[in-house]
Amino acid sequence: MKKLEIIKNRITSPEELPRIIEQLRLKSNKIVFTNGCFDLLHLGHIDYLSKAADCGDILIVGVNNDSSLRLLGKGNHRPIQDQTSRSTIIAALHFVDYVVLFGEATPYELIKLVQPDVLVKGADYKLEDIAGHDIVLARGGEVKRIDLLEGHSTSLIEKKIKES
């Protein structure tokens, strides 16, 4: 199988997830879920996602599709990269096992589907503001907040580009 095919095979749909999750659970894998826009991949994303992957055996990353990203109020100029580009780039990271696009403002329904053992978000979120925290905690899972790498964000990159 060619390298790009391997990467594309890591991108799945919400409809395919129950079958994948069932197989993962049979092997007693600790499933970690996180999500984001990942519009311009940068060192902050790599740091965050690698730390999320360290929280378990399998990392599933929910990526906002183009329409849901617009719901977040990131501005008319976002996304900078389309959902195919963003999901493929995230799937190319060796520590990411699966990527799934979602179309809602939050991944709540996706988290209901995945039922992760660990839900990860940035430390800039309060526990009660993390979509799906209630689902994960109710089944005895963990919600972890990871410190973000200071000075690395898509907004800062965008600002730097505009100023140059």
Image (spheres, grey):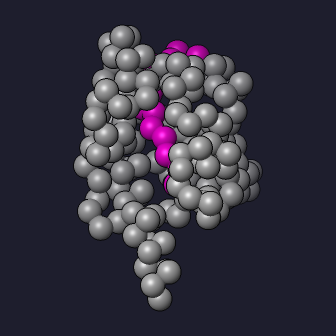
Q: Nearer the viewer, residue 27 or 54?
A: 54
Q: Position of residue 23 (x, y in %)?
A: 59, 20
Q: Position of residue 7 (x, y in %)?
A: 65, 51
Q: Is residue 50 visible?
A: yes
**Res 125 quadrant in image:** top left
* Left or right of residue 17: residue 59: left
* Left or right of residue 127: residue 44: right
* Left or right of residue 42: residue 107: right
Vertical relation: 115 (above or below) 101: above
Q: Is residue 7 visible?
A: no
Q: At 48% from the left edge and 41% from the top edge, which residue is drawn?
A: 35
Magenta segment range?
22-38
Q: Position of residue 91 (x, y in %)?
A: 59, 50
Membership of 53 in magenta stretch: no
Q: Nearer the viewer, residue 138 or 50?
A: 138
Q: At 61% from the left edge and 34% from the top edge, which residue is drawn?
A: 104
